[in-house]
Image (cartoon, rainbow, N blue to C red):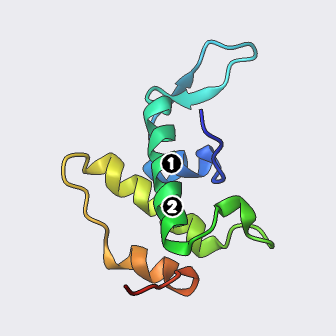
Amino acid sequence: MAEISIAEADVWDALQVDLAEDGSSPPQLVPVDRAFIRTLIEAAEERIEGYVDQELSEFEDGIPSSIQRAVILDVLVHYRNRLAPEMPDEYFALIANHRVWGFG
């Protein structure tokens, strides 16, 4: 699994998924589809990194809260509407200050 920068628990809270014990010792509460959600987080982070032209782990003062919210919003959109995800304007507003623009 790739390393992710956003806390999985924050995404689970935003998704409002039901948690169940995972069978480990001591038992942890995790979503049944934890692996799928994790792949959505990885993909969301990759998309953001493409827009801001740097890895999330490279932000000097930690990941900005707007970037964290954008990753969570990306996961929400792709989790709830898997067949035809459409990013809302809010997503682009959240990353606008960090986005690297290029033409040509």
Q: Position of residue 58 (x, y in %)?
A: 73, 65
| Above/below status of 63 relative to 16 | below
| Residue drawn where x is 31% and y is 67% of the image | 87
Q: Please, what secondary structure does the residue beneath circle 2 have?
A: helix
Q: Within 10 Å of the Cα at label 2, are there few (<14), some (14-19), or many (20+) other Cα atoms?
A: many
Res 56 → quadrant: bottom right
Q: Along the line of sight, which residue is nearer the eye, 28 or 59?
A: 59
**Number of numbered discs visible in the structure rendering:** 2
Res 88 → quadrant: bottom left
Q: Within 10 Å of the Cα at label 1, are there few (<14), some (14-19), or many (20+) other Cα atoms?
A: many
Q: CA distance from mark 1 to mark 2?
A: 7 Å
Q: Position of residue 20 (x, y in %)?
A: 53, 24
Q: Which mark is residue 98?
A: none
| Residue drawn where x is 52% and y is 47% of the image | 42
Q: Position of residue 39 (x, y in %)?
A: 47, 39
Q: Which residue is mark 2?
A: 71
Q: Which mark is residue 41?
A: 1
| Residue drawn where x is 76% and y is 67% of the image | 62
Picture quarter with the C terminus: bottom left
Q: Give the mark nearest the N terminus, 1 or 2.
A: 1
| Above/below status of 73 relative to 20 | below
Residue type for callout 1:
Ile
Residue type for callout 2:
Val
Q: Along the line of sight, which residue is nearer the eye, 16 or 1?
A: 1
User: Farthest residue in the front direction?
Assistant: 104
Q: Please, what secondary structure does the residue beneath circle 1 have?
A: helix
| Residue drawn where x is 63% and y is 53% of the image | 6
Q: Are marks 1 and 2 in contact (CB under 8 Å)?
A: yes
Q: Left or right of 26: which side holds 64? A: left
Q: Left or right of 93: which side holds 9? A: right
